[in-house]
């Protein structure tokens, strides 16, 4: 049998999806599973986007331009300019989800073995993208007790060497929900300027900010046009995860020209996804007002409920729709698996993502889970009750073994 590639063997499994077989088995057994493991919103996709697909009149679903439909890029640039971000349509490359945008960016900016500094915990798929691009992640640990605030600038500078080419943040953050302040983004911008690094910012959750706080984009930074790379997507903003439309945005013309070669090699982004995404830009503000209000209420209910459970600690996030909770267990992955395989409360159970998969060190985050508040408030409260009862039984099981 021919051998597999070392890169393939090194590609990590998704901590978000790895327990899916256990959830499927629980459902086959007739149990209700509350899926808090994945950021799949239950919010309806805007009607304007669905209608655009329903009314698609072309007789052939053809390739588009490799950079994406010009009409979509022009309209998307207008959306950014309404946010007072200086973006022209030539600065935009449409991609197959934000994932492809990150992959194109890494392959355009890094050589094999180059290093990328990332505050952790970080979105688990960054490990996959960097593995594919042969990039080395250098993590900077943020702490749950500080709500995962940006670590000190000194900790970043301590990691910078001749192999360092960039810094990556997700703002607001997945998996933490942390919203970086204007001052924190400016600090990172000064680091990028001082050491001539790329500053990548994954901003797919831009609209989801709570407590009166506002998002500050890396595109607001002046004098760093050649260093800034922004990643975006329609997946969460318009509850269109399956459309698979993202965007790579930079005013660095050489970078965009290089990324275009990777875009040409995959031919084009999805045609119908672009049709829906272009139409979604006409979504009324009232849609976002309602969606943000719902997520805000869900966040409050989930975080308050978690912190009422003995031994559980969860900081309140200011953005996105995730939180990380510390549980009174030694191995959260074992606990998450046990919840699906062996436990039910009133014939219900909960699926969570073990947070260890969002850290680089093997033992980090072992007692933490990521939860996505993408279900109704009623479902979240039922899931909290389930989790509370599960933790009791799990603890009793170990007490009996002693």
Image (cartoon, rainbow, N blue to C red):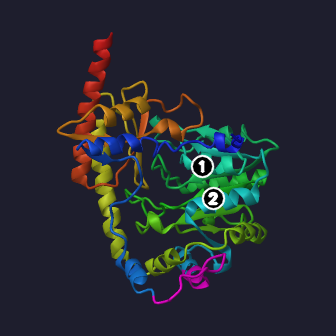
Residue bearing mark 2: 102
Residue bearing mark 1: 126
Compare marks 2 and 1 and give the one earlier in the sequence: 2
At 55% from the left and 45% from the top, the residue drawn is 122
For the residues labelled 2 and 1, say whether their Cβ atoms are less than 8 Å apart.
Answer: yes
In which quadrant is the C terminus drawn? top left
- Judge whether residue 315 can be spotted in this image: no
- Mark 2–mark 1 distance (CA, rounded to whole Å): 8 Å
Above or below 59: residue 15: above
Magenta range is 57-75
Pointer 1 local density, CA inside 10 Å: few below 14, some 14–19, many at least 20: some
Q: Spot the residue most to the left.
A: 346
* Res. 113 image quadrant: top right
Above or below 342: residue 169: below
Q: Report the number of numbered marks.
A: 2
In-image side of 35 versus 165 (left or right): left
């Amino acid at each position: 049998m021919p051998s597999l590639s070392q890169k393939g063997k090194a590609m990590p499994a998704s901590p978000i999806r790895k327990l899916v077989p256990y959830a499927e088995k629980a459902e086959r057994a007739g149990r209700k599973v509350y899926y808090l493991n994945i950021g799949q919103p239950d919010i309806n996709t805007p009607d304007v986007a669905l209608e655009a697909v329903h009314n698609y009149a072309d007789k052939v679903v053809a390739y588009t331009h490799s950079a994406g439909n010009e009409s979509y890029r022009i309209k998307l640039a207008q959306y950014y300019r309404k946010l007072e971000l200086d973006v022209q349509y030539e600065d935009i490359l449409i991609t197959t989800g934000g994932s492809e945008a990150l992959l194109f960016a890494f392959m355009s900016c890094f050589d094999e073995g180059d290093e990328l500094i990332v505050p952790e915990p970080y979105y688990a798929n960054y490990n996959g993208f960097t593995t594919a691009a042969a990039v080395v992640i250098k993590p900077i640990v943020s702490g749950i007790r500080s709500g995962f605030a940006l670590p000190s600038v000194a900790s970043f500078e301590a990691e910078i060497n001749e192999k360092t080419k960039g810094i990556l943040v997700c703002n607001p953050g997945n998996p933490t929900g942390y919203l970086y302040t204007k001052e924190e983004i400016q600090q990172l911008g000064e680091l990028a300027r001082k050491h001539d690094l790329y500053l990548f910012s994954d901003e797919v959750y831009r609209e989801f900010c709570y407590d009166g706080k506002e998002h500050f984009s890396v595109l607001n930074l002046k004098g760093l046009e050649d260093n800034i790379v922004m990643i975006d997507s329609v997946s969460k903003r318009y509850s269109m995860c399956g459309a698979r439309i993202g965007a790579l945005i930079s005013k660095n013309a050489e970078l965009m020209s290089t990324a275009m070669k990777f875009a040409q090699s995959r031919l084009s982004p999805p045609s119908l996804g672009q049709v829906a995404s272009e139409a979604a830009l006409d979504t009324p503000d009232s849609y976002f007002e309602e969606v943000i209000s719902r997520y805000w209420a869900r966040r409050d209910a989930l975080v308050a409920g978690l912190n009422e459970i003995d031994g559980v600690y969860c900081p309140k996030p200011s953005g996105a729709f995730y939180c990380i909770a510390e549980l009174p267990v030694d191995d959260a992955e074992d606990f998450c698996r046990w919840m699906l395989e062996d436990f039910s409360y009133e014939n219900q159970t909960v699926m969570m993502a073990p947070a260890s998969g969002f850290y680089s060190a093997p033992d980090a985050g072992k007692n933490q889970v990521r939860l996505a508040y993408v279900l109704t408030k009623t479902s979240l409260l039922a899931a909290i009750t389930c989790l509370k009862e599960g933790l009791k039984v799990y603890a009793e099981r170990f007490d009996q073994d002693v």
